[in-house]
């Protein structure tokens, strides 16, 4: 089920953006076989590992005899391989692009790293905040004189990493189906988070509109119509009424249409700080729920700031079935939506290694070979350390 039905992808188990990429492709209908690391949790329930949904899991210890051969047999029928190891790890395992593409010339070899496969920092470990700090994205996401912070994992791991890898893999598969030639997709969270800046950077050559490198940051100019405001109950709402018609609607609904300071507020930057202070007092006089009742659904570009559990209960989320609970764990439904081809339905997360016997049987391995692999530890051993990953 899904627009990617018929696409087969092997995923090397990892952390963060690699598994998220695989989940996205599985949501869209691709068949994903995850090569998991054996360990004490094999066979145990793991309903919280949402990035494993929709996938089949086998366990292989790639440092044991015969395991690499099994892995290579997996890619014989695959359209793509997705891995998130640090540069050089797959090569040391005997599963680098040269070997895999020689065996399967049409394979799309998707690689997910922090800083990319080459460059001075390629071997340097890091996390989301490190990559987006170096790319310039964290600076843009931070108000002046405030501590640089961004939502964890969203900007680097997911937006700059997993989504770019998914697009690269699908694009590579489309090309391979045209000419039969596979290739390597080098997706780096550093690269992707920089690329995400292009919409903002496109404003920099327009100084006549007030844009400069300093004021492309959120609330850098102190606009009172583009601001988060605290409510009487300690919760927050966000206003972003940039266009004149939306701003006019905002001040009308706030009862300020008679106040010429607010009427002319967008064209009088010398008053912005004062107007922000006054709006802060106005919004602090009512609770978030009261502001929702007054402004939600209007053309004021308004929204309450909600936690994920609160967001799941919002009528719009309910109508669109954005969130679902499976085995007691809240998760977001597949996106985007397709008019003709529904994406995969959410189901329980399979235990690690749950499909090992099934997949090995599909590969045509004899019972004797499976017994040998088991005896030699290829199907079960101690897990890798986190040092192998980004």
Image (cartoon, grey):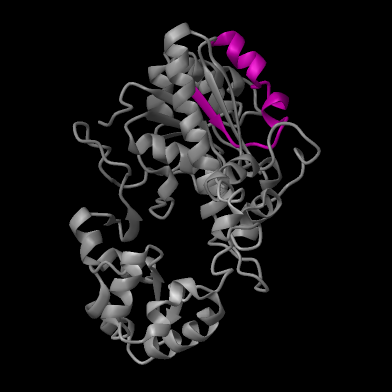
Res. 235 visible in picture: no
Q: Is residue 127 above or below residue 61?
A: below
Residue 66 placement: quadrant: top right
Q: Out of 212 and 389, give the one closest to the viewer.
A: 212
For the N terminus, the quadrant is: top left
Q: Is residue 21 above or below residue 326?
A: above
Image position of 52 (left or right of 325): right
Residue 338 placement: quadrant: top left
| Residue 258 belongs to magenta span | no
Q: Position of residue 262 (x, y in %)?
A: 40, 81
Q: Out of 37 and 162, give the one closest to the viewer.
A: 162
Q: Is residue 99 above or below residue 216?
A: above
Residue for point 55% across, 45% down? 196
Region in magenta: 79-104
In the current view of this chain or complex, which residue is farthest to the right? 120
For the C terminus, the quadrant is: top right
| Residue 93 belongs to magenta span | yes
Image position of 27 (left or right of 104): left
Q: Position of residue 109 (x, y in %)?
A: 56, 23
Residue for point 68% across, 21% down? 94
The mark tally for this picture is 0
Residue for point 31% across, 70% down? 300
Residue 209 placement: quadrant: bottom right
Res. 92 visible in picture: yes
Residue for point 37% across, 22% down? 7
Q: Out of 311 and 274, give the one closest to the viewer.
A: 274
Q: Position of residue 219 (x, y in %)?
A: 54, 69
């Amino acid at each position: 089920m899904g627009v990617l039905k018929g696409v087969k992808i092997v995923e090397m188990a990892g952390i963060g953006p690699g598994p998220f990429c695989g989940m996205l492709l599985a949501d869209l209908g691709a068949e994903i076989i995850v090569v998991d690391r054996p360990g004490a949790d094999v066979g145990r329930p793991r309903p919280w590992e949402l990035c494993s949904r929709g996938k089949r899991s086998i366990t292989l210890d790639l440092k044991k005899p015969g395991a690499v051969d099994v892995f290579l047999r997996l890619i014989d029928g695959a359209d793509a391989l997705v891995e998130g190891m640090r540069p050089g790890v797959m090569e040391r395992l005997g599963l680098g692009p040269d070997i895999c593409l020689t065996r399967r010339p049409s394979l799309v070899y998707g690689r997910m790293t922090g800083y990319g496969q080459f460059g001075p920092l390629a071997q340097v470990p890091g996390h989301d905040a490190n990559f987006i700090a170096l790319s310039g994205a964290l600076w843009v996401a931070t108000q002046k004189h405030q501590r640089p912070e961004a939502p964890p994992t969203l900007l680097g791991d997911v937006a700059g990493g997993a989504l770019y890898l998914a697009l690269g893999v699908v694009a590579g598969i489309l090309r391979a189906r045209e000419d039969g030639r596979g290739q390597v997709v080098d997706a780096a969270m550093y690269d992707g988070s920089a690329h995400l800046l292009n919409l903002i950077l496109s404003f920099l050559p327009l100084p006549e509109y007030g844009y400069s490198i300093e004021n492309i940051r959120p609330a850098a100019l102190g606009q009172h119509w583009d601001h988060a405001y605290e409510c009487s109950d300690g919760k927050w709402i966000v206003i972003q009424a940039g266009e004149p018609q939306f701003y006019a609607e905002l001040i009308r609904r706030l009862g300020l249409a008679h106040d010429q300071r607010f009427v002319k507020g967008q064209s009088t930057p010398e008053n912005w700080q004062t107007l922000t202070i006054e709006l802060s007092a106005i919004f602090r006089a009512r609770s978030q729920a009261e502001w929702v009742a007054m402004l939600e659904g209007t053309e004021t570009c308004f929204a309450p700031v909600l936690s994920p559990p609160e967001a799941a209960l919002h009528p719009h989320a309910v109508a669109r079935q954005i969130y679902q609970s499976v085995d007691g764990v809240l998760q977001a439904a597949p996106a985007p939506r397709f008019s003709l081809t529904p994406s995969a339905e959410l189901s329980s997360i399979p235990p690690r290694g749950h499909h090992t016997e099934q997949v090995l049987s599909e590969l045509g391995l004899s019972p004797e070979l499976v017994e040998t692999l088991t005896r030699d530890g290829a199907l079960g051993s101690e897990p890798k350390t986190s040092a192998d990953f980004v």
